Structure formats: structure tokens, C-alpha cells
Amino acid sequence: MPDEAIGTSARRAGAAETSPGISTPGITRPDPGVVARLRAIGTATISGELNRLGVRSAAITGPVPRTPGATVAGPALTLQCLPKREDLALADEYADPERSLHRHVLYHARPGDVVVVDARGDLESGIFGEMMLTYFAAQGGVGVVVDGCIRDFGSASRLGIGLWLRGTTPNFHSQTALMPHAVNVPVACGGTTVVPGDVVVADDDGAVVVPIALAEAVAERAEEHLEWEEFSRTRLAAGGDLRRYYPLTEAARPEYEAWRRSRAEQQQGAQRAEQREERR
């Protein structure tokens, strides 16, 4: 059964038989409109708003941006790794490959998804390489956050997906200290709990995790925050007083409200002009 996108009436996707005899759970996907709004906001503002909503720190610590300028937001597909035990892990990279669960998290990929990997901070195991990430990109995946390493970084970085990593290595996934253990279960990535389906937003500051139940509230609060910051930025750039404009003080609020009204009128005028042009 394939994973399905959902709207406000969330429901859990069932398990999918990702290979004959192997089933792994699907995820609940958030409203794509909310995801798009979060992507436009950015991680710094989201982190602050989550803190004000009671989530002390939503930032994933350790993985850093390796594809400068990339900004992604999408539901989390999760992969959990454990310390390798030789009687449970494959010794050969290509022996019975469908037993390797790092493949199976990618089989759930849909357009806009982000894979989050609990690789225990390990710097010797390349969880994914170019070939598997090529597959992920072709399914519409947009980003990968690994508390550990990938390999084939040079080629992988040119696939058009965002990469947030602790490092890189020539080794394959189970060559040294790790083995993939579970797909789409809650994981700890960089000291932060990630539940399958949570919205992961990542940019040049790093990656943050928005709990799916808070996504709408975070988007609403963060959009309001961005608006007053835009106003304050214009005033600060013109030489305004930092103490007055950042954060926005009550003394500056009437000025801000007038700016909002003026901007709304300008936007409405521009829309009417566009409509007149379309009717010609």
C-alpha cells in the first residue's frame, strides 16, 4: 500500500511491502500547503517560534549544510541505525541487498520528502551513495539529513537535493560500525527526536523539526513574525534605532500598522492593474 498525502484530516499510512516478504511502515504526511509556507519562512524564525510554543530546541545538531543555498521542507522518512552485530548485518555490500533496510526507507519516497537518518554520529559508515541518492532524487525527494556520513559526495552533491551531513567517507553503509535497523520509527537525529511525518525544514543555518501537530500554528505565528521583521529591517537599513525596531516595540507599533496598511493598498493596486491588463 503506498504512502498517501493528507490534508487536515490526518491518517496513518499503512505498512508497505517494499520488497517481497519485507514490509515497512508508511508515514502520515502533512498538508502540502503548510509545508510550502514553512519552507518560505526559514529555520531561524521557525526555531524561535517553536521555542515560544514550548519546544525548547528543535534544531538537529551535528549535520551541517553541504549544499550551500539549498532550502527544503518536507515530511520526514526516518531510518534508524544500530551498532553493527556481525550475525545480524550483511558482510558483503551487494549480498542479498533487499535485506538492507537503508534501501527500504527510499522505497517510501514521494515528491517533497526528506530522509532523516539516525546514524549515531558515526563518521565511518556511508549510509547512502550516489546510486541510491540518484533513485531518491528521481522519486522527487528533496533532502537528506544524516547524523553521520554518505559516500560519493562529489556526485551526490550535483543531484539537486539538499544534503545536511556530519561528514563523508569512502565506506559503504555496513562496512564498519553500523547496520540499518528500522524504517519510519521515531529516531534521535543530532540529539533531536524526529517522528515519521514531522516537517523537516533545512537551509544554510541547519535543520529543524516541526512536530506535525504544531505545523499550522508555527506557520501562522512565523508569518506574522516575518512581516514585522520586514518592516523593522527597512527602518534599521535607513538608520533607525535598534532599541525601537528590534524587537518591535509598542512605541513603534502604530508606525508598523500604518506600513502594513500602505503595503496592502499597494498590493491591491498592483493586482487590479494586472487584472486590467489581462482583460485587454
Image (cartoon, rainbow, N blue to C red):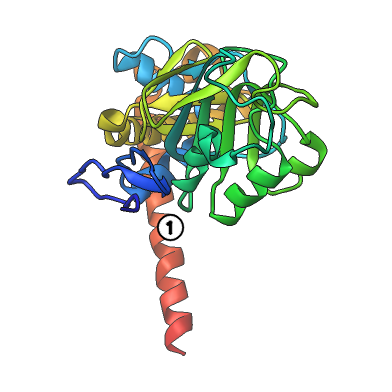
Residue 162 in the figure: left or right of residue 267: right
113 or 200, nearer to the observer:
113
Q: Is residue 160 above or below residue 45?
A: below
Q: Which residue is farthest left?
A: 9
Residue 37: x %, y % from top left: 41, 43
Kindly indicate the quadrant of the structure image that contains residue 207.
top right
Residue 98: x %, y % from top left: 53, 41
Kindly indicate the quadrant of the structure image that contains residue 91.
top right
Residue 41 in the figure: left or right of residue 161: left
Q: Neighbour class for label 1 at 10 Å: few (<14), some, many (≥20)?
A: few
Note whether residue 214 is visible. yes
The amino acid at mark 1 is Gln
User: Residue drawn at (38%, 44%), measured in percent from left and top?
Assistant: 21
User: Residue drawn at (48%, 53%), measured in percent from left and top?
Assistant: 111
52 or 99, nearer to the observer:
99
Q: Is residue 205 above or below residue 86?
A: below
Residue 262 in the figure: left or right of residue 61: left
91 or 61, nearer to the observer:
91
Residue 77: x %, y % from top left: 44, 36
Residue linked to disc 1: 267
